Image: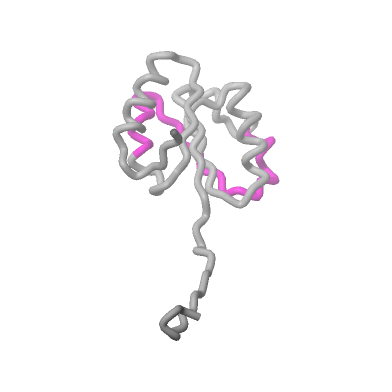
Amino acid sequence: MQCCGGEVGLLLEPLPVVPAVAVFGIGHVGLELARILARHDLDLHLVDSRPDQLTPERLAVLDDALAAVHVHQVPVLPELVLAELPAGTHVLVMTHDHAEDAALCDAALRTPAWPRSG
């Protein structure tokens, strides 16, 4: 009840948004992180510039994933994958190369579609 006698009704409904996470760099740490994330209902994007990191044999540990796993093998300029990701995707950068990390971080920070933590 309002002080003027009026009433306000409020309906809260969850939005059917599936979270998305992109892991850039699927080395030993990235793969373990992917195994943890794959247990959740989300879109999981795995990105690496090294072909041997994204082989079906290596990614077999994700065969029972609840997540929808998307593999992006990009031998040059992995930051181009950023444009393919859904808005709101959480981006984790942990590649094998500092220059690649810097390019990815720079490109991600320039992309207005993703949340930033303070």
Residue at 33% x, 33% y: name it: 80
From this view, report whether residue 45 is shown above or below residue 109: below
User: Quarter-wise, where is residue 115 in the image?
Assistant: top left
Instruction: Identify which residue, 66 or 116, lies in the foreground.
Output: 116
Give the quadrant of residue 63: top right
- In which quadrant of the rendered image does the C terminus lie? top left
Nearest the viewer among 35 and 55 is: 35
The question of residue 13 being in magenta is answered with no
Residue at x 65% of width, y 50% of height: 66
Q: Find the residue positioned furthest to the front.
A: 3
Residue 12 in percent (x, y) is at 52, 70
Magenta includes 77?
yes
- At x 54%, y 23%, the residue is 52
Residue 112 at x, y percent in the picture: 31, 41
Residues rendered magenta in the picture: 59-82
Left or right: residue 45 compared with residue 115: right
The single residue placed furthest to the top in the displayed view is 98
Look at the picture and state if 56 lies above or below 95.
below
Which residue occupies the foreground of this view, 99 or 64? 99
Give the residue at x 49% y 31%. Answer: 92
As drawn, the residue found furthest toward the bottom would be: 5
